[in-house]
Every structure is written in structure tokens, then in C-alpha cells.
Amino acid sequence: MGTARRRRVPAAGRAVYKMKERIVIGMSGGVDSSAAAWLLKEQGYDVHGVYMVTRAMDEREQEAVRDAQAVCGVLGIPFETVDFTQIFRREVEDYFIRSYLAGETPNPCVVCNRKVKWEALLGYADGIGALCVATGHYARVERLENGRLTVAMVNGGRKDQTYALYGLSQEQLARTRMPVGGYTKEQIRGIAAQAGLVVAAKPDSQDICFVPDGDYVGFLRRSGAGDGKKGHFIDASGADLGEHLGLCHYTVGQRKGLGRSFGRPVYVCSLDPVSGNVLLGDNEELFRTRVVLRDFNAMGLSPELPVEEPIACMGKIRYNQQAAPCRIFRAGGRVKAEFDCPQRAVTPGQAAVFYDDAGRVLGGGIIDRA
């Protein structure tokens, strides 16, 4: 048969066909990103699924790739694995190691989101002509009255993932879609089941992806970083309470696993990366009202804010806590937060994230010190 000739239609009566908008979604092999891909396809997007390879493919990773590929097969969308191991090692693993050696307790997901799940994935999207990227995060992108884009809590904050997203830039947010943000976890599992996706009942991952066994010191040893600087346990008076195992074994607020007994309950109150000493004290000594931040990202605030005049908001100093009333302000060239009520175990290296009353992120940064 010959090639069919296309019949010309007069401009006035010609139907207008809009090309589908291409979008790249990061597929983890879990239920959230899988349901997100289904929702995007239902919304009419030209969906491309990508599994981001960030480390050597162990059995768990291989299973995740198979699940992601199976989901894309059911949905009838393209699927590709993309090697991001170099950028992940440089931006996430090396950061994790440096932070621990500095006596901090890092949150690598914050860095991974901005540098890998968004920055690197957007670079891939540019290469295939996609305007946006999507993820399975439980959050919603919103534009505030001041024109700034931000991420907002959903479902009353019961499954809040905005805490680890505060570092995203305005450019990244403008090219982001979060299709599961309007649903509960139970609803997402129901959507996945109705769509016939094999991951509908798959359990959530709870660990840092590159330390799946939760043995952070083991990871640091394997990386060549070791146990961290050696030093001594000391009390508030400066009394020497004996040698410890190395700074990487400890975090602020820790009581168990100190490596020795002290005859009474004591807690890690601070770590000194210069001397290598670990300050121990009672539980009451863990509470602080002021937090000093670095690398602050004014997501929902005008870039020049916060200024000397404090901004009333709600703040979280760790992922799994309720936001508490506080004020953020700039003083002495640093962004600081003052909480109405003392916060327990303010931990350098963790993120502090600040919200308005509607659960929308105003900004956040890394805790430098209390």
C-alpha cells in the first residue's frame, strides 16, 4: 500500500491538536511514585519513568528497578535507568561523611532532593525535551501572595514531606509536579491496586538509602572515614569521664550506646570537633530556645528576608516532630530562630524548617549550633 496522503483542512475549520506535555517522573519502585505516574498519565501527560541509579546495584536495588519497570510496563510508558552515581557520591555521600566527621548528625535527604532528585533529574529532562519533573512526595507546590513558590503540608501534616524539600529553588519548584499531594497514603495504595500495579501493598522504605542496615558507623568505616575524632567524655564542670569511641558514634540527645556505664542516666549534650570531646549531662541540659542556622533558603520569603524584625512562624528542628511557635530573624549576618518553648536536643547538621499558619514553608536551613 502507498503512503496515505494527508487531506488539507481549511484553517477556519481545522481542528487544533495540542501535543501532550512531556514530564519525567523519578520512579523508586515504591507505591507513591508508581501511583504518581498513573495519575500523571490520567491527566494527559506524556510520562517518562526514570530510575535514578545512585550506588552499586545490590539485591534490593535490583528488585526496585524490576518493580519500577513492571509498573511502567503496565502503564505503557517509557522507562529508563539513569546513572547518577557520581553526583550522588559527590553531593550526598561525601557531604554525609564530612558532616559526621565535623561532629554533626546530617540529614542527607535534604541535599539529595535538591542536587539529585531535582537538579540532576531536571538536567535529564532537558535532554529529552521535558518541561517538568514529578515525584511521589506528599506535598503540594503553591504560589504565595508575595509571588514566591513554596511547598505546603498536606493531610494535616500527618505524612509531612515538606521538611526535606525546603532547599528547593524557585526555578526547581516552577518545573515540579507532585500529583499524590492531594491524597492520603491509604488512597494512594487504593489507586495503585485499582490500576493493577504490583507495588500496591509494598512496604515503605524507612532507612537512608545508602545505609539500608542503619549502621552509619559501619558505612563511615567502609568509606575510609573511620570512627571520627577520638576524645573524652566530659561533664559541665569539665571533669574527664573517660575516653569515648570516636565522634561518629554519638549524636545530641543520645543516652544508649555510649560505650560505657556512668552509674546514672546521662545524655550527649554536644560534640566538639576541635577537641574531640563529648559533653554529657542530664536530660534538662538538652533544652534550648535559640537555634543558629547556616545555608538558609528563603523559599517562601523574599530573598532579602528574614531581616532584623523577627518573623513569627512555626518551626521544626527534626522531621518527626510537631512544628512549634517561634520567630526567625537575621542578626550578626546569621539567620537565627527563637522558640517560645525550649526545644529538646537541638542537633547540629539537622535541618530546621519554618512554616506559616497554613503549613506552607517559609524557609529553612542547617542547624549550626544552639
Image: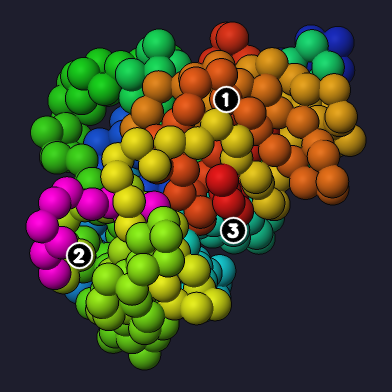
Crowding at dot 2, Cα within 10 Å, few <14 / some 14-19 / many 20+, comes out as some
Q: Given this view, does label 1 or label 3 mark the residue nearer the observer? A: 1
Please tell me whether residue 346 belongs to the stretch shown in magenta.
no
Task: In the rendered view, tell whether residue 197 sits above or below residue 43.
Answer: below
Q: Which residue is mark 1?
A: 339
Secondary element type, mark 3 = helix
Frontmost residue, 17 versus 271: 271
Residue 82, picture quadrant: bottom left
**Which mark, residue 106?**
none
Task: In the rendered view, tell whether residue 173 sits above or below residue 238.
Answer: above
**Which mark, residue 258?**
2
Residue plotted at (13% across, 69% down)? 260
**Which mark, residue 115?**
3
Task: In the rendered view, tell whether residue 6 sits above or below residue 232.
Answer: above
In this picture, residue 4 sits left or right of residue 62: right
Residue plotted at (23% across, 52% down)? 266
Task: In the rendered view, tell whether residue 45 sits above or below residue 145.
Answer: below
Q: Is residue 325 visible?
A: yes
Residue plotted at (81% across, 37% down)? 330
Frontmost residue, 239 versus 46: 239
In this picture, residue 190 sits left or right of residue 271: left
The tag earlier along the polypeptide, 3 or 2, is 3
Secondary element type, mark 2 = loop
The tag earlier along the polypeptide, 2 or 1, is 2
Amino acid at pointer 3 = Lys
Residue 90 in the image, given as x and y percentages of width and height: 54, 75
Q: Is residue 49 visible?
A: no
Frontmost residue, 109 versus 25: 109
Please tell me whether residue 262 belongs to the stretch shown in magenta.
yes
